């Protein structure tokens, strides 16, 4: 075997190429024939065309058989005229110039010519809602036999195209609808609304349907009727009875409220729903509570920057989820993932109540819960938790000259440690609410052995431990040694261990010797 023969093995070269930048890959084309044969398809597998990146048609024609992903962020009649892209699976068409006079029939013809290979189609007409895609575009997309994902954004749908759009939306397993203007379709939607039922009539043309839907309403024109737009989006979603995952992104109260109210109409139209995400929704607590009472037994609920108040909490704990056969259950009993992030309406007592009431949780995120509320509250029932991300807030005002107040707070803190110590399946623990770019001071538990750290000896599965926004910790070498001895699976520790730099250096060396990556702000 010669010394250079390893480079003749395509599988080895393919592994090497994974670690190279695009520029380095181009350079390596000259290494040998095997490198050339392996790298050339990788270079031309993804082609992006924009006003800043120019490719000649001769180059494209020569390498078109390698193209799997074509992205156009500038209108190009030459690119859209390409034919014979035998491997193209993804087509993304972005237009950011609203003054551009586009011929959308070219987009239609490109999709029709590659309908046998296309699996993912994305069409974004950025802030160009005056552009109305032709009916033939929707017909072309419905002919794509391998379609798995469709994303459409920033376009106006005329009434005559609405039924075709619905048929398009039934093709993929994943659907994204972003800032689509359906105002002209309101009358048709109203006519169809009486037929939308999870238990009775289902339009045969809409059989199937996506399992994952995301809807965005962030950039709808302020001159539009926001409530009408939200209602139209909600009524459209109700057509797809088999959806399992639904993500709603809004930011304007009228739009968000109308969308949720449309979804909440009787009868409930999404019986298969398992995961629900609200992202920056500006709806009211009462509207969210009304929806929660209708939800089936979800396994995942995410509320980011969304108003979650007492009414929503009550609905989550007491509302009747619909079970097959007409049985009812509390929504909190089915959730395995619950994330309530950047929701400043959530109070400490509400977080404690959730920890007391959701027995199947494996991942829980919320803003904050105080030591006092945890100590005075009931036992946590979520013994299967693997991830806990909550600011456990040291709220007691301890008077150093009052032994009784110090003793009282110390006892409460030990009660908190005892509850944490029973979560023996924990793998990731963030006790001051990890959120990227948070720089505020978040005082949390005193992590010294004398304060109760030793009560966490049962967390033998812990891999990540973070308290990185607490600048008042006074941990010592003895605490770090204890951690390395009891948390053998720990790989990452983030937090300010001690104010003394010399002590910190010694602690870091101990952690490093045990294979723990320490991040100390």
Image (spheres, rainbow, N blue to C red):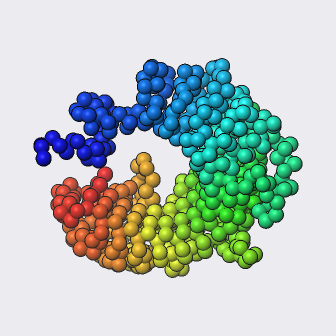
Looking at the image, can residue 443 be seen?
yes
Q: Judge from the rendering whether residue 369 lies leftward or rightward of residue 293; answer left or right.
A: left
Q: Which of 59 and 493 is in front in this view?
A: 59
Q: Which of 428 and 40 is in front in this view?
A: 40
Q: Where is residue 464 in the image (x, y as percent from the top left)?
A: 35, 63
Q: Which of 373 and 438 is in front in this view?
A: 438
Quadrant of the rendered structure where residue 153 is?
Answer: top right
Q: Residue at x 62, y 46 (%)?
A: 145
Q: In which quarter of the image is residue 482?
A: bottom left
Q: Residue farthest to the front?
A: 1
User: Residue at the location (72% across, 51% down)?
Assistant: 237
Q: Can residue 178 be seen in this view?
A: no
Q: Residue at x 85, y 48 (%)?
A: 190
- Identity of the residue drawn at 55% across and 36% down: 91
Q: Is residue 216 above or below residue 428?
A: above
Please say if 175 is above or below 443.
above
Number of marks present in the image shown: 0
Q: Is residue 379 left or right of residue 99?
A: left
Residue 30, above or below 324: above
Q: Position of residue 22 (x, y in %)?
A: 34, 33
Residue 89 place in picture, x, y as percent: 52, 41
Q: In this view, does 218 lie above or below 298?
A: above
In screen coordinates, is 357 left or right of 20? right
Query: Residue 385: image x %, image y %?
Result: 46, 71
């Amino acid at each position: 075997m010669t010394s250079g023969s390893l480079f003749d093995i395509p599988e080895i070269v393919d592994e090497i190429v994974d670690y190279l930048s695009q520029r380095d890959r181009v350079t390596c084309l000259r290494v040998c024939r095997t490198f050339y044969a392996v790298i050339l398809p990788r270079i031309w597998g993804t082609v992006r065309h924009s006003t800043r990146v120019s490719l000649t048609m001769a180059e494209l024609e020569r390498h078109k058989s390698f193209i799997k992903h074509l992205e156009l962020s500038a209108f190009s009649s030459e690119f859209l005229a390409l034919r014979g892209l035998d491997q193209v699976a993804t087509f993304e068409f972005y237009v950011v110039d609203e003054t551009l006079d586009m011929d959308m029939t070219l987009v239609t013809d490109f999709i029709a010519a590659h309908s046998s290979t296309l699996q993912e189609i994305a069409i974004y007409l950025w802030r160009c809602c005056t552009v109305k895609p032709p009916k033939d575009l929707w017909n072309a997309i419905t002919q794509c036999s391998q379609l798995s994902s469709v994303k459409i954004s920033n376009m106006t749908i005329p009434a005559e195209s609405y039924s075709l759009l619905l048929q398009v939306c039934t093709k993929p397993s994943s659907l994204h609808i972003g800032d689509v203007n359906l105002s002209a379709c309101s009358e048709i939607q109203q006519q169809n609304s009486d037929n939308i039922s999870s238990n009775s009539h289902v339009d045969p043309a809409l059989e199937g349907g996506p399992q994952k839907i995301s809807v965005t309403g962030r950039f709808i024109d302020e001159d539009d009727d926001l409530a009408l737009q939200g209602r139209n989006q909600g009524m459209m979603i109700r057509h797809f009875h088999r959806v399992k995952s639904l993500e709603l992104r809004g930011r304007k109260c009228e739009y968000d409220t109308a969308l949720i109210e449309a979804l909440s109409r009787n009868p409930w139209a999404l019986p298969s729903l398992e995961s629900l995400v609200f992202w920056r929704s500006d709806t009211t607590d009462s509207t969210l509570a009304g929806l929660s009472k209708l939800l089936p037994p979800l396994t995942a609920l995410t509320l980011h920057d969304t108003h979650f108040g007492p009414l929503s909490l009550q609905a989550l704990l007491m509302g009747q989820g619909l079970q097959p056969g007409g049985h009812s259950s509390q929504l909190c009993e089915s959730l395995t993932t619950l994330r309530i992030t950047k929701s400043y309406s959530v109070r400490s007592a509400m977080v404690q109540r959730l920890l007391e009431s959701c027995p199947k949780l494996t991942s829980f995120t919320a803003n904050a819960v105080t030591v006092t509320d945890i100590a005075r509250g009931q036992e946590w029932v979520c013994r299967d938790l693997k991830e806990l991300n909550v600011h456990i807030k040291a709220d007691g005002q301890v008077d150093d000259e009052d032994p009784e107040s110090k003793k009282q707070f110390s006892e409460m803190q030990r009660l908190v440690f005892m509850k944490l110590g029973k979560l023996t399946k924990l793998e990731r623990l963030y006790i001051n609410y990890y959120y990227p770019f948070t720089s505020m001071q978040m005082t949390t538990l005193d992590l010294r052995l004398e304060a109760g750290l030793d009560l966490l000896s049962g967390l033998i599965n812990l891999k990540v431990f973070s308290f990185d926004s607490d600048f008042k910790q006074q941990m010592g070498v003895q605490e770090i040694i204890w951690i390395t001895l009891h948390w053998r699976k720990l790989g990452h520790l983030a937090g300010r261990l001690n104010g003394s730099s010399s002590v910190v250096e010694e602690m870091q060396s101990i952690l490093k010797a045990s294979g723990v990556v320490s991040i100390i702000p």
